[in-house]
Image: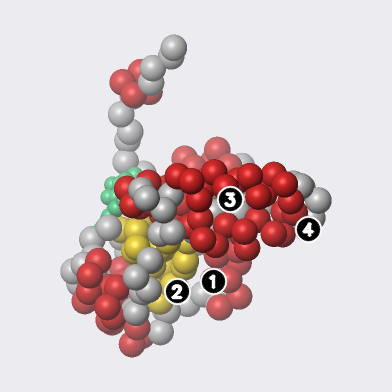
Amino acid sequence: MSLSIQSLIESRVSVNHFDPARPVTDADIRELVRLATRAPSAFNFQNWKFIAVRTPAAKAQLKAIAYDQQKVADAAVTFIICGTLEAHKTLPHALRPAVEAGIMDQTVADTWVEFATAAHPANPQLQRDEAIRSASLAAMTLMLAAEGMGLSSCSMVGFDAAQLADTFELAGNEIPVMLVTVGYAAPGNWPQKPRRPVEEVIALV
Ligand SMILES: Cc1cc2nc3c(=O)[nH]c(=O)nc-3n(C[C@H](O)[C@H](O)[C@H](O)COP(=O)(O)O)c2cc1C
C-alpha cells in the first residue's frame, strides 16, 4: 500500500537510530538520486551533486568528519549533497534535453542562459544562495523519496565542511550543503516532534 504524500510528510522523522544490519542496494541509491533530481532549481540549473557514502571505510572517514555521529556508521548510506557554484556555465547543457524534448524552444533556452549569465558571474552571494537552495530542495525530495521506498533518513549539518571537501575531493565550485543519512530505522527513535502552530508562522496577505 502506498501512502499519500500528506501521510509521508506527517510520518517522516529525523531518525537517530538506524539498523546497521540492513544495507540498501546501489540500485536503491541510484533511484533515490534519480528522484532527488526531480526537485526544482532556478532556471532548471540542476546545480547539485550527490556523493553516496556506503562502504565501511568511507563511512568511517565521514563519521569522523561528522563529529562522530554514530548514525553515519549505522545507516546504509549517507549522501553528501553538494550545491555547485557558477551554475550559469553549465546551463546550456542542463537545458538541452528540454529543448530536444520540444518543451522549450532554443530561443527561450538561450534567453534563460543570457539572464543567468547577466546575473551570476559577478555575484558570488547569488551563486552561493542558488547552490544552497538547489541542494536543500534536492535533499528534501530525497528524504521524501526515501520515505516512499520504506526507508528513513536524517538531514545533518553537523560536519566540518573544509575537512569534508578535502577528504572527499570536492571541486572548488562544490559546496557541501547537507548530509542525509538513509537506511532502515531501528527501534527507539523519537516520533516526529510537534511544530510551531500554523497561526504563529503564517501571514495571509
Ligand atoms: C539543516 C538541518 C541540519 C540538521 N543537523 C542535524 C545533525 O547534525 N545531527 C542530527 O542528529 N540531526 C540534525 N538535524 C535534524 C533535526 O534536529 C530535526 O530535523 C528536527 O529536530 C526535527 O525533527 P523531526 O523532523 O523528527 O520532527 C538537522 C536538520 C536539518 C534540517
Question: What amino acid is found at the position of numbered circle 1 in the picture?
Answer: Ile
Which of 28/74 is in front? 28
N-term-proximal mark, 4 vs 3: 4
**Element class at badge 2:** strand
In the image, what residue occupies the spot 38% across and 66% down? 174
What's the distance in space between the residues labelled 2 and 1, CA to CA?
7 Å
Q: Nearer the viewer, mark 2 or mark 3?
A: 3
Q: Are marks 2 and 1 in contact (CB under 8 Å)?
A: yes
N-term-proximal mark, 2 vs 4: 2
Please name the residue that numbered disc 4 is placed on.
Answer: 100
Please name the residue that numbered disc 1 is placed on.
Answer: 29
Q: Nearer the viewer, mark 4 or mark 3?
A: 3
**How packed is label 3: few (under 14 Cα within 10 Å), some, or many (20 or more)?**
many
**Element class at badge 3:** helix
Say if residue 23 shows up in the picture: yes
In the image, what residue occupies the spot 42% across and 68% down? 79
In the image, what residue occupies the spot 62% across and 59% down? 92
x and y percent of residue 114 in the render? 57, 47
Quarter where residue 67 is shown: bottom left
In the image, what residue occupies the spot 27% across and 73% down? 164
Please name the residue that numbered disc 2 is placed on.
Answer: 52
Q: Would the CB of label 2 be found within 8 Å of ligand 1?
A: no
Please name the residue that numbered disc 3 is placed on.
Answer: 113
What's the distance in space between the residues labelled 2 and 3, CA to CA?
30 Å
Q: Would the CB of label 1 be found within 8 Å of ligand 1?
A: no
N-term-proximal mark, 1 vs 3: 1
Q: In the picture shown, does residue 25 fall above or below 79? A: below
Quarter of the image where the C terminus is located: top left
